[in-house]
Image (cartoon, grey):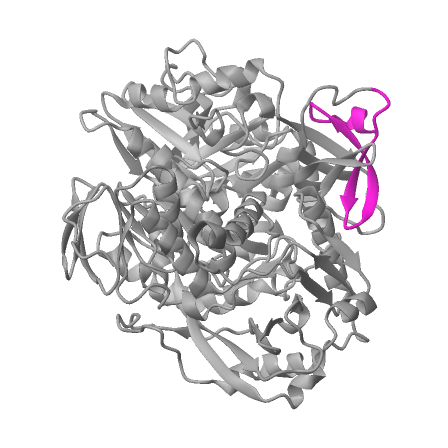
Amino acid sequence: MDAAFPTQARTVIVGGGIVGTSIAYHLAGLGQRDVVLVEQGRLSSGTTWHAAGLVGQLRQQAALTRMIRYSTGLYERLEAETGQATGWKRCGSLTVARAPERMTVLARTVAMARMQGVAVEPISAAEAGRLFPPMRHDDLLGAVWLPGDGKANPSDVTAALARGARAGGARLFEKTRVRAIETVNGRAAAVVTERGRIACETVVIAAGQWSRQVGALCGVAVPLHSAEHMYVVTEAIPGVHPDLPVMRDPDGYIYFKEEVGGLVMGGFEPQAKPWGMAGIPEDFEFQLLPDDWDQFEILMENAIQRVPALETAPVKLFLNGPESFTPDNNCLLGPAPECEGVFVAAGFNSAGIALGGGAGRALAEWIVAGEPTDDLWAVDIRRFGRFNANPAWLHDRVKETLVLHYAMPWPNRELESARPLRRSPLHDRLAAKGAVFGSKMGWERPNRFAPGEAAAPPAYGFGRGPWLAAVAAEQRAVHEAVGLVDMTSLGKLLVQGRDALAVLQTLCAADLAMAVGESRYAPILNRRGGIESEVMALRLADDAFLLTTGSGQAVRDAHLVRRAIAADCHAVLTDVTSAYAVPALAGPRTSDLLGRVGRSRLSDIPPEGSAEIEIGYATVRAVRRSYIAADGVELLVPTEFAAGVYDSLAAAGAALGLRDIGFQAVDALRIERGHPAWGRDIGPGTTPAEAGLDGVLAFAKPSFTGREAAFAARAAPPAQRLVHLTCDLPDDAMAWGGEPILRDGDPVGEITSAAWSERLGGLVAIGRIAGGEGVEQPGRSYAIDLAGRLLPARLAIRPFTAAEAA
């Protein structure tokens, strides 16, 4: 350890586990030598040292799979680079299935792995038994084999990363507790430790389960909570050898790996046990929690069923080590929106060893480049709000999210704990009409309206379920009459001031120098030309704009806008999401309904324009635009008027066929119309040209972020292309997104959004395929791989009409 304690550094990393040392290692590798890491205990002494060390490559999000695949390569080469062993062994892994539904999951896993370039092989139960001899397999239906998976020694990997970081110029200090993080004008300025103050430009909070406490030192909310995680280590067991693969039995909530001739067996029990409600002790270094055999009982029972030798094998160690978990089971990476210069890398949900190498590289690149170099929205800390860091809410939520590791990954699964959190002023009225609620960014939102279903337990499945009739009826209402959807959860950001237009013109790729009352779709690009976000911009006055964004993007987009406001700019952003309810009308009878509740009709409002109109006793702003129909309006209603406006619309609309619409129908209708959803169909890795959106870019403007890259992308052959698909669905089959698209039998892309279309009488989907030249060339055949079933599909660049799809 370095003797001289620094008084300044470019970057200070708080936390010396595998993630913190990985960030230091990768910053040094990028030429950032002025890096200091401080650890309150000793390296790896918090959570890292007692991690099981499993490294499974495949994840739902391709970016996370790329992270882990990078980790495996890094761990493999670190010993030669640093001289420090990592314990890495590419032993492969098995996942076995007890239930038919799990076999469907495994079939989807095989398709997804092949699409992402991960070696995979579906195998029989007997073949799985030969690969893992101690396992009983006569009650299994099958398995998948991933030969590139493996395991590592967490403490050794951390030591190797630390050695590599030091070799690159980083300085690491153990036994150095942080007492304060100083800020000046909303920016990180210094880290104050027990050994002295370090002035700095950037602070990285990589303090594991202490990260929420460290974040509080500078007003940063870090939504994670600790829970107990237990495993046992046995004495030697016959048939167990050093090359034994990792084995996961998710139907039993358990995993196994070899260790010194015995087995490590742990898992993720159905009801987790949160820990550390009063805060995590600072001196909790290389410590464990008391054994809890009652909590572990269900895992042990299932493990004995899978490996009968465990019934008599002596247990030499019961290990109960707390780890931190997040509200959605994905880690937290990226800049803290509350304080410039502060980054977070925490909440790894028992996947810190697998993700550590790749996450360290990703965050280091983010710090150096000023933006992520991959699509990291799934792990971006800005997907959460400050309210998500409420300890009571987190305590209840992590009981459920821990088990998601091995729970059946049902499509459209809704988390049930710690709800309701945020409610629209229309919530009670919608509930009375049989709304089946889902949750987005804490908002309770109706998925569909089905009075009988609303009171019953969820009926999940991989095919079409009992939801179909209600969702189909809602789609018909929008096609034939008028539908009303509560879109109050949309983020609403008010940008005001003399320089408001100048700020937005530089940030957004569309031309926002429009007349007062006009609205426009406005992508926000990154420097690579990718779609970093998208907003609908409404000009309220010469010096005021209202930006409407997706329900989950408000925190992130507010941060993007605030970062674009220079210190000397006369502009300010205010999040006014809660100030307005947004009942939206869509369908051919929208104009008739407006005429019945007031004096205005749809024709009185120009397309993409807005006007103040009367609805009953209230005056509201109507914006003529719709995500889901040719005719529609979004009504910006001050919250206190929302109930009265809804009642007026409901009373007058009854004779016109008005129907309340949930977000499942909204999704189907927007896919039909060809509107890509940010975060699913498009994102930071998609250029407007690839998405067919380059027509909205204002290249005539002298500059906007990403202009040059977007211009170059428009002229070059596309690396990928957004496409539209439709196909017949046999029986009760259904696609949900993530399914491979095959062209002439070869995988060329994936489904990004899918829904049942009542108008088309089958599946309607949006997808991404590689390239884009000759997509609709005659003679080419397309299919969708639906868990191993190949469904012939029609594919086109433009959305399908009913006639085209027939």
| Closer-to-camera residue (690/206) | 206
Q: Does residue 555 appear anywhere in the picture?
A: no
Q: Position of residue 282 (x, y in %)?
A: 26, 70
The residue positioned farthest toward the top in the image shown: 700
Q: Position of residue 549 (x, y in %)?
A: 44, 35
Quarter in which the C terminus is drawn: top right
Residue visible at 72% across and 66% down? 96
Horizontally, is 795 left or right of 363 in the view?
Answer: right
Q: Does residue 451 appear anywhere in the picture?
A: yes
Figure check: 795 above or below 330: above
Query: In the image, which residues are magenta?
Result: 778-806
781 magenta-colored:
yes
Residue visible at 44% across and 43% down? 362
Figure check: 777 above or below 165: above
Q: How many marks?
A: 0
Q: Position of residue 206 (x, y in %)?
A: 34, 55
Figure check: 795 above or below 277: above
Q: Position of residue 348 (x, y in %)?
A: 45, 58
Quarter in which the N terminus is drawn: bottom left
440 magenta-colored:
no
| Closer-to-camera residue (203/611) | 203
Horizontally, is 160 left or right of 463 in the view?
Answer: left
Horizontally, is 319 left or right of 172 in the view?
Answer: right
Horizontally, is 787 left or right of 44 in the view?
Answer: right
| Closer-to-camera residue (288/580) | 288
Residue visible at 47% across and 51% down? 357
